[in-house]
Amino acid sequence: MSRNYLIVGGSKGIGLAITKQLLSENQEVIVLSRSNDTLPDHPNLKHITFDILEDEVDALELPEELHGLVYCPGSINLKPFRALKPEAFLVDFEINVLGAVKVLRKCQKALSKSGNSSVVLFSTVAVGQGMPYHTSVATSKGAIEGLGKSLAAEWAPKVRVNILAPSLTDTPLAEKLLSTDDKKAASNNRHPLKRFGQPEDLAAMACLLLSEKGSWISGQVIGIDGGMSTLRPM
């Protein structure tokens, strides 16, 4: 049976990988993003040009019933704490947290109407690990983990909410961190599984959580991180 999914930030990186996988499963997908030049031409895909920092979420025309929502927008602002002004924290918080809050508020009724829907949010391995130069992004992503767990409790049993916490993944957002062969090799070696992430790694878990196969999973922060959060190779 075809189901309706909303992917915010679904035209690049992990969001695009999720969009493609859902379309391959013949699902109905709505993508909110600033551009659509990377999206496939597919009859089940609808694109709405949207900027989470500038456009009004309440003005969006969305289906009355949604089976799933994925919020992908994020930031990688890696600087020493002394170099970060309070305004930098506010910008990261607005993208990562307030943007998600606005979309979740808009979609709550439609998600509840289906009676068995799923929300996927994104954190980072740096929240649980504590990494230098990650104070701003880890602060906002830590808030996402609190938001997701709280909503999972409040919206149960009709809506499931889970959070994926990836390590470095090969997306446009991370291109400066993987811009040379040396940087890629160093990143590979930092992971116990000896490779950095690919968008498809995250998409596989996200789509499982959106599907009936994930129907008994809610309120979880799931590390998709090449073992970085739990393993210490000798």
Image: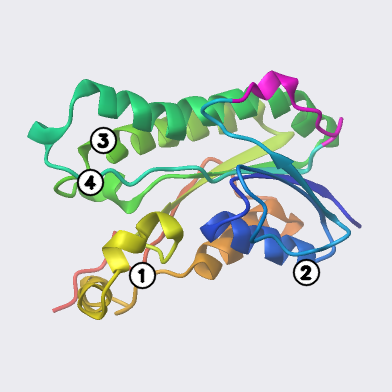
Eye-nearest disc, 4 or 2: 4
Q: Tell me the amino acid under the disc marked 3.
A: Ser
Q: Which residues are magenta?
A: 55-65
Give the mark nearest the N terminus, 4 or 2. Answer: 2
- Mark on residue 226? 1
Q: Tell me the amino acid under the disc marked 2.
A: Ser
Q: Quickly name the residue at label 3.
A: 136
Seen at 77% across and 24% down, the residue is 109
- Mark on residue 104? none
Q: Is residue 57 magenta?
A: yes
Q: Tell me the amino acid under the disc marked 1.
A: Gly
Image: 40 above or below 148: below
Q: For the residues marked 3 and 1, what is the alpha-carbon distance in whole angstroms? A: 23 Å
Q: Quickly name the residue at label 2.
A: 24
Give the mark nearest the N terminus, 3 or 1. Answer: 3
Q: Nearer the viewer, residue 227 or 11?
A: 11
The image shows residue 208 at horizontal and vertical percentages of 65, 60
Identify the element where label 3 is drawn. Answer: helix
Q: How many marks?
A: 4
Give the mark nearest the N terminus, 1 or 2. Answer: 2
- Quadrant hosting residue 171: bottom left
Q: Nearer the viewer, residue 147 or 58?
A: 58
Q: Quickly name the residue at label 4.
A: 78
Looking at the rendered image, the quarter that the C terminus falls into is: bottom left
